Image (cartoon, coloured by chain):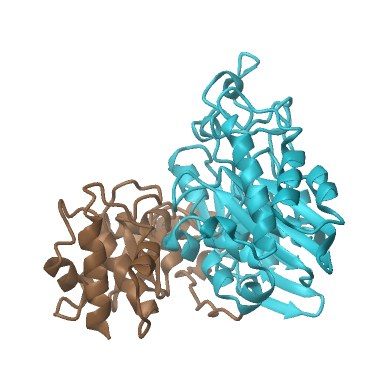
């Protein structure tokens, strides 16, 4: 089963400052050049064969159709990058351990946990968050509103995102309550408002037809 | 999470080079295990080598000698594969019950096989053997989810991979890329029982990369059945995969593998021997299950797992025979 070939996700390389040249350049350059050296050091430790980055790296993420440049360390999760650096606060930080679903986003058409995805691995991919969804009468957010699919609301963006992805994947199919339960079992609601969530999902499935 | 260097190699050879290039480097697939271990400071790699974008890792290939599954394909990809659905229902069933839709969209086959144990002493930083003053914290402590076989040893955690169980039942092999080229081993040889001074349950070396799994052509019947606490988002309490060669109604050859009951995937030759030459029905399945657990030595809090293990063996055998009696 062939999978989609990954696109070129190369980082901005500063090839003029590679390898041992990097240290040598740092030793003799001053002023602006030193700043460039520091930046390059953070961005790239050149090594034979493999490209390695550390420190702050500038990456570009395509979120809800818009390219956004952001500086992150390799250890930054996509969730923290979205919330703390890009002010995209739909995805919520709850368990931060891939256990609750509140951070769900859609990457290249698949609902995933953004708390357990490193931002640096998302370059060149298409990221969708709840902010980009259709809020009109045929959209999933409207169905949640109409069917009271929330109480405190903190899990809701994750549920809406997982629900939209599940329904997009099952377009044209007759979706049953059992299907909805299985499709949304990666999300947890501590208030326990599952009945409203399931009703909203079934109504949204009808509206999308 | 501690800071680390990040490498995104484009070929398996470059990945091996990047892993060998720094002590403490670790490979990253879907991240559902490693990223959480890093957040909890159970693992703090100096360098992450990201494997999921390596193109060659991400497809399955059906040939007359079997199905080759790239280590980088996700469990969702595996579930969508028509050959898996048709020939390897035991593998499909085990994959279907892993985690949640989101986990299955992220997690890779290689990552599932090489995930680290879920033992809460290990996950709390006490090490795989969880020894304190020369004594096992597991044996004296809360061991409700721990091993019921091989418990005379020091390793009391259970091997966590759900996919390893059907793959071993099916006789699958793993192909591994190292610095000196590729090697192929049976999937069961990915695992070992750690002991004091050798606290590693995986045999793969730090600089090696799991490339693919090859499952031989299916013959006969295969099935898996697992018991969990939760309906989803949980690891099995007990899991059984069977692969049966049939001679008419009778079983001529059997492989019966148990998961989540020992520090390695466990093959039950006692159960296999008891079912050979017989038809599968409630009586013979019961006898096979009883034979399998006759050597179980549960810990202080997990005797219930012995009965659960009997049930999953019985249900896996009956499922292979197409008799889902518990659904009626």
The percent position of residue B145, horizontal first and vertical second, equals: 55, 35
Residue B222 left/right relative to A56: right
Residue A128 left/right relative to B284: left
What's the residue at 70%, 56% (across, down)?
Answer: B317
The percent position of residue B169, horizontal first and vertical second, equals: 75, 57
The percent position of residue A115, horizontal first and vertical second, equals: 37, 54
What's the residue at 75%, 60% (across, down)?
Answer: B243
Letter of the chain shown brown in the rendering: A
Q: Quadrant of the N terminus of chain B?
A: top left
The image shows residue B263, relative to residue B52, as above or below, that is above
Point out the residue furthest to the top here. B133
Q: How many marks?
A: 0
Q: Which corner quadrant of the image does residue A131 belong to? A: bottom left
What's the residue at 15%, 72% (across, down)?
Answer: A142
**Toward the viewer: B284 or B188?**
B284
Q: Is residue B262 visible?
A: yes
What's the residue at 52%, 41% (across, down)?
Answer: B44
**Toward the viewer: A70 or A32?**
A70
**Toward the viewer: A111 or B209?**
A111
Letter of the chain shown cyan in the rendering: B
**Toward the viewer: B201 or B181?**
B201
The image shows residue A13, relative to residue B304, as above or below, that is below
Residue B183 left/right relative to A97: right
Q: Is residue A127 visible?
A: no
The percent position of residue B79, horizontal first and vertical second, equals: 56, 70
């Amino acid at each position: 089963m062939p999978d989609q070939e990954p696109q070129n996700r190369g980082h901005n390389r500063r090839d003029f400052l590679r390898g041992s040249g990097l240290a040598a350049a740092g030793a003799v350059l001053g002023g602006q050049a030193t700043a460039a050296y520091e930046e390059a050091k953070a961005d790239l430790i050149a090594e034979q064969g493999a490209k390695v980055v550390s420190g702050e790296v500038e990456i570009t993420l395509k979120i809800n159709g818009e390219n956004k440049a952001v500086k992150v360390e390799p250890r930054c999760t996509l969730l923290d990058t979205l919330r703390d650096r890009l002010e995209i606060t739909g995805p919520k930080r709850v368990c931060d351990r891939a256990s609750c679903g509140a951070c769900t986003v859609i990457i290249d058409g698949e609902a995933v946990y953004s708390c357990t995805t490193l931002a640096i691995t998302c370059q060149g991919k298409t990221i969708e968050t709840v902010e980009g969804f259709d809020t009109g009468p045929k959209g999933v957010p409207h169905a949640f509103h109409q069917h009271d699919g929330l109480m405190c609301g903190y899990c809701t963006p994750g549920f809406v995102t997982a629900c939209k992805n599940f329904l997009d994947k099952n377009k044209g199919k007759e979706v049953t309550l059992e299907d909805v339960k299985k499709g949304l079992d990666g999300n947890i609601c501590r208030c326990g408002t599952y009945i409203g969530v399931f009703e909203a999902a079934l109504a949204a499935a009808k509206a999308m037809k | 999470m501690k800071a680390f260097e990040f490498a995104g190699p484009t070929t398996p050879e470059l990945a091996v080079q990047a892993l060998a290039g720094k002590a403490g480097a670790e490979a990253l697939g879907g991240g559902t295990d490693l990223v959480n271990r890093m957040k909890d400071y159970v693992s703090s790699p100096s360098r992450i080598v990201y494997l999921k974008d390596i193109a060659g890792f991400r497809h399955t290939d059906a040939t007359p000698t079997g199905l080759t599954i790239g280590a980088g394909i996700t469990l969702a990809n595996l579930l969508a594969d028509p050959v898996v659905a048709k020939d390897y229902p035991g593998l499909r069933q085990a994959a279907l019950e892993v985690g949640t839709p989101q986990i299955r969209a992220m997690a890779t086959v290689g990552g599932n096989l090489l995930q680290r144990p879920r033992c809460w002493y290990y996950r709390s930083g006490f090490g795989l053997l969880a020894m304190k003053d020369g004594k096992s914290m597991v044996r004296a402590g809360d061991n409700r989810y721990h091993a019921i076989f091989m418990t005379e040893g020091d390793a009391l955690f259970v091997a966590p991979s759900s996919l390893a169980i059907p793959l071993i039942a099916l006789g699958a092999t793993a192909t591994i890329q190292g610095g000196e080229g590729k090697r192929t081993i049976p999937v069961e040889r990915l695992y070992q029982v750690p002991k004091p001074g050798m606290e590693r349950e995986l045999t793969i070396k730090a600089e090696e990369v799991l490339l693919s799994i090859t499952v031989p052509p299916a013959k006969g019947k295969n099935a898996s059945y697992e018991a969990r606490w939760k309906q989803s988002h949980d690891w099995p309490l007990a899991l059984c995969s069977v692969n049966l060669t049939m001679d008419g109604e009778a079983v001529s050859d059997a492989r019966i593998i148990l998961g989540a009951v020992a520090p390695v995937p466990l093959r039950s030759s006692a159960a296999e021997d008891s079912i050979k030459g017989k038809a599968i029905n409630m009586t013979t399945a019961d006898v096979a299950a009883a034979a399998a657990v006759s050597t179980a030595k549960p810990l202080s809090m997990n005797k219930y797992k012995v009965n659960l293990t009997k049930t999953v063996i019985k249900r896996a055998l009956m499922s292979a025979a197409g008799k889902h009696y518990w659904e009626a």
